[in-house]
Amino acid sequence: MGREKDAKEDEKAKHKATKLKRLSDSERAGAGGDNIKKSPNPTKATENMDKRKSHKKVKTPKMENVESSSSISESVKQELQDDAFTAKKKGVKRKRIKDDPKEGTSDSANSPTLKKKKKQRHLEEEGDGVAQTKTSKKRTQKMVKKEEEEQAVSKKSKKTKEEIEEARQLKIKKKEEEEQNRWRWWEEEKYEDGVKWKFLEHKGPYFPPEYQPLPDNVHFYYNGKKVKLSLAAEEVAVFFAQMLDHEYTTKKVFRENFFKDWRKEMTHEERSLIQDLDKCDFGEIHAMHKAKTEARKNMSKEEKQALKEANQKIVDEYGYCLLDHHKERIGNFKIEPPGLFRGRGEHPKQGMLKKRIQPEDVIINCSKESRIPAPPAGHHWKEVRHDNTVTWLVSWTENIQGSNKYIMLNANSKLKGEKDWEKYEVARKLKSRVDDIRYQYLQDLKSKQMVTRQRAVALYFIDKLALRAGNEKEEGETADTVGCCSLRVEHITLHEQLDGNECVVEFDFLGKDCIRYYNKVPVIKKVFKSLKLFLENKQPGDELFDRLNTSVLNKHLSSLMPGLTAKVFRTYNASITLQQQLKELTNKSDNVAEKLLSYNRANRAVAILCNHQRAPPKTFEQSMANLQAKIDARKEQLALAKTELKQAKKEAKTKGSSDPKLQALVERKKAAVKRCEEQLLKLEVQATDREENKQIALGTSKLNYLDPRISVAW
DNA sequence: GGGGGAACTTAGCAGCAATTAT
DNA sequence: ATAATTGCTGCTAAGTTCCCCC
């Protein structure tokens, strides 16, 4: 990896901003520490604190690796290759890849673990030629996988080793072919301003199947009486019935919204009859649905295979488009089916009916000279347009929020890849400027102007804690969540002293997706003082940064560095954190398993920083208990093995050590003890890892924030 | 200058496939 | 072979940013 370069840069940066760094290091520590989705219980809190601690070390923002692009591309190449290589072997699929700017070093490390990292998408793009191979590989891999699956399935039935081997070969071949065909768009010139493509052709969206009426033996009951519903009302009833096992259907808001919208679908008679949701009995419909899913699970191999093939056919037909004469995979080619709106958290619109989209609602975007997709028989499109300054192929307006939905390309397409690459490039650029920018906002903390001062504090949070920008939201339209600029007085508590630290800010608010952000962060005095000032004469519901909004903030940022916006800090800090963690956590001597653990730990640090959470898995308690039981069993076994060993030793001694049989026995027992110990250790590590991971979602950061080049380099 | 909307990225979750343990 | 776990993918909601219009 371009360590040397980095190091140099680092040095420079360090000199420049020693102060800053100190600051940031210590400060950054707490970032995003503990959040507990539901109830913040004390135990957790302590755990979290620990995490935070470890974190602190981690986070210092040095930018070691971000180096010059030239080195990058080289490193990239290597990475790519590595990646590809590994990927091929395993046939691993990849998620998206991103490339990042950051690392670039070239050592290339390829540990097998890399596979896990999946970020390849961008990689490809990045470098000039380099990437290509990668991308192609990636792609191919995906396809290959599919193919493999198919093949595997068919072969399994016969399953001879040769056949499997054959299949493997075939796959590899196919992969290679794909690679050959892969569009090396990163080698091509960019289009002029705003133009996203010159030629675009596709088949249009895939519509969900029409509603199938209930069979005659399944009934809906109202107030104990059988009621035959009209088709429209029945369909909506089924949506509800299918969700009966879900918590949603117990929520008041959900039920009310559903009922209101359902009544709109009813005929006059139905509406006058059905006045109370509590009197509705969806039992039979629910049972039917459950039986159906059960039946699907129990399908024979052949049936499943047939289904798969049918799906593949749809993908083949609708899943690709032609963009500038290259075949590209579409990300979501299906129109979203109707159903009940599942907003996150306390969403005021949860349960509302999400209507079925008709071709008449759909706008098609493609080249004038392409083959225009045909609407379903008897229908017409809302509009066909030819706008090559946008990347979508199809769009429609959704009825819940009135927002637009789009069909766009897959993540490893040129259009997405390029953007992703740009994102990491901006983050790299920030690396070289961040010291100045930090210096600037620290200066701004002294400003007499309220706006400037609020802006400085907000930036401090965004940089240090990786908070999101925080746009204003319309009340009543969405759940009440906030980001940095939209924080309210009630979301923070100031502590002059807390847990041995001075000037601690306690955050507690719901962020994107209603994920709770809870963190106690020591801040510098100036920030603390400013916060006190901002809080003066305000009610809990008032805005903390009343003079600030995201557009003011971003305008300022872009004046500091072109392309800089609030979210770049998230990308930047996530990548830097990963890089540092990796550096800190791994030793050369580590074996693969240890390295993997380190990578996961580093990844976890990033996820914590970004507050990526998940609900603890439903089976978590159970599986943890199982694991514990296993550990206990192991322990017993170990004890037993130990006593046996002792006994064998004793016997060997008393009966004469010359007896080879007894000697062998001792050896065997020794080995058994050792094995037991190892297994026990392994289980324990597993338990820790899992516990630590309980509510942290790693995938998002991998997917969206971590520059793949860092991983590759590592 | 700010309101609103279009376009695009980021996010968690459900469900299933792949993998590992039993 | 089966059960349990893990890991992906697809889906689509929920953000950010930019831009236009007044």
Image (cartoon, coloured by chain):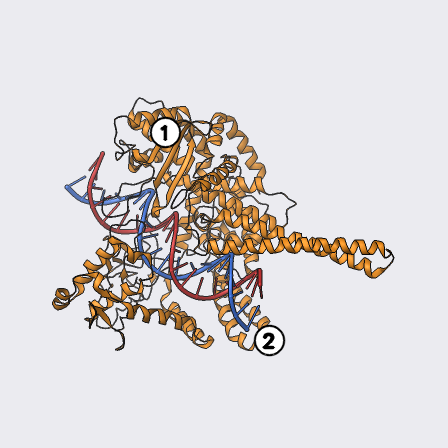
Chain colours: A orange, B red, C blue
Identify the mark at residue A33; answer none if there is no mark: none
* Image mark 2: chain: A
Front-most of residues A412 and A386: A412
Task: Using the rendered view, name the quadrant where residue A107 is placed.
Answer: top right
Percent x, y of residue A665: 78, 59
Task: Using the rendered view, name the quadrant where residue A442 is placed.
Answer: top left
Residue ID for mark 2: A160
* Image mark 1: chain: A
Total number of numbered labels? Answer: 2
Percent x, y of residue A346: 29, 49
Give SS at disc 2: loop
Percent x, y of residue A581: 54, 41
Q: Residue at x 46, y 34 (%)?
A: A28
The reply, left or right, for residue A187 in relation to residue A488 is right
Front-most of residues A611 and A312: A611
Q: CA distance from mark 1 to mark 2?
A: 68 Å
Residue ID for mark 1: A494
Query: Is there one chain holding both mark 1 and mark 2?
Result: yes
Nearest to N terminus: mark 1 or mark 2: 2
Q: Residue at x 47, y 40 (%)?
A: A48
Percent x, y of residue A298: 43, 73
Give SS at disc 1: strand
Density class for disc 2 (Cα within 10 Å; few <14, some 14-19, many ≥20) is few
Front-most of residues A83 and A480: A480
Task: Check disc 2 and give the amino acid type.
Answer: Thr
